[in-house]
Image (tube, rainbow, N blue to C red):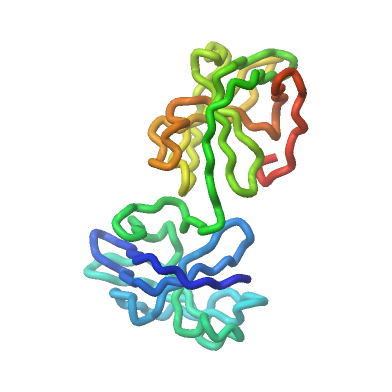
Amino acid sequence: MRIERSGKRVRAYLGGRVVVDTVRPSLVWEVPYYPAYYVPLADVRADLVEVGPGERSPSRGESTTYTIKVDGHEAAGAATRYPDSPVEELRDLVRITWDTMDAWFEEDEEVFIHPRSPYARIDILPSSRHVRVEVDGVTVAESGNARLLFETGLPTRYYLPKTDVRMDLLEPTETSTGCPYKGFAEYWAIRAGGGLHKDLAWSYPTPLPESERVAGLVCFYNEKLDIFVDGVLQERPKTPFS
């Protein structure tokens, strides 16, 4: 577990009411992939009604769970404290489960999915390298006008113009995912090789500002199909999405 103070003003809202307003948030990495916000108890602007003991963490100790109530709105079991934690910095802090709130803001910008890590970076670069995407021996995309997205901890992603994609082989699915750095993605299944391969391709129709350069482009899971760059087959990476 890692703890780091942030200098951002952080606010959380429920039912249009402020639940948290702090300039003293802490980023706590409970898992390796991204942090959670822990905020000082004094900066919680809602009532915390104790529910009872929560789960025990090997690193953080015994927890207490609370329901958040504010002006007729409530989020059951949404807050967690570690008042007797072996980690002294956590004892006067509260973690509020992200998706129990209606909205979160860092300064005056709304943030989605989870807090943004100060150690995650995205670079999007235009590339004239020849990129070809193949599913079960069928070429579904081929382009010399890709945008390469480099994101900390993930493999290079190849975003291609729809005009270079066999959109006739793609079928929309109901899947949608969110990313705090890129926004919300829509997905396609790919019909190739006699089968329908679900959710192999995605696109961000209206990405967040830092990722605007991939707006409307199509990307494919390197982990689940074959991508050739300048004629060289790329190794399928091992990631949580494999």
Quarter of the rendering occupied by the C terminus: top right
Q: Is any part of residue 110 visible from this angle?
A: yes
- Residue drawn where x is 45% and y is 79% of the image: 93
- Residue drawn where x is 45% and y is 32% of the image: 213
- Residue drawn where x is 29% and y is 75% of the image: 45
The quadrant where residue 20 appears: bottom left
Q: Position of residue 46 (x, y in %)?
A: 29, 74
The quadrant where residue 12 appears: bottom left
Residue 108 vs 66, above or below: the answer is above
Please state which of residues 125 and 113 is positioned toward the viewer in this rendering: 125
- Residue drawn where x is 67% and y is 32% of the image: 222
Name the side, left or right, on which 129 lies relative to 3.
right
Give the number of callouts.
Answer: 0
Quarter of the rendering occupied by the N terminus: bottom right
List the single residue furthest toward the bottom. 84
Q: Position of residue 91 (x, y in %)?
A: 50, 84
Q: Position of residue 226 (x, y in %)?
A: 72, 24
Please state which of residues 109 and 69 is positioned toward the viewer in this rendering: 109
Q: Position of residue 60 (x, y in %)?
A: 60, 78
Residue 91 vs 71, above or below: the answer is below
Residue 53 vs 225, above or below: the answer is below
Q: Is any part of residue 77 visible from this angle?
A: no
The quadrant where residue 71 appears: bottom left
Name the side, left or right, on which 66 lies relative to 56.
left
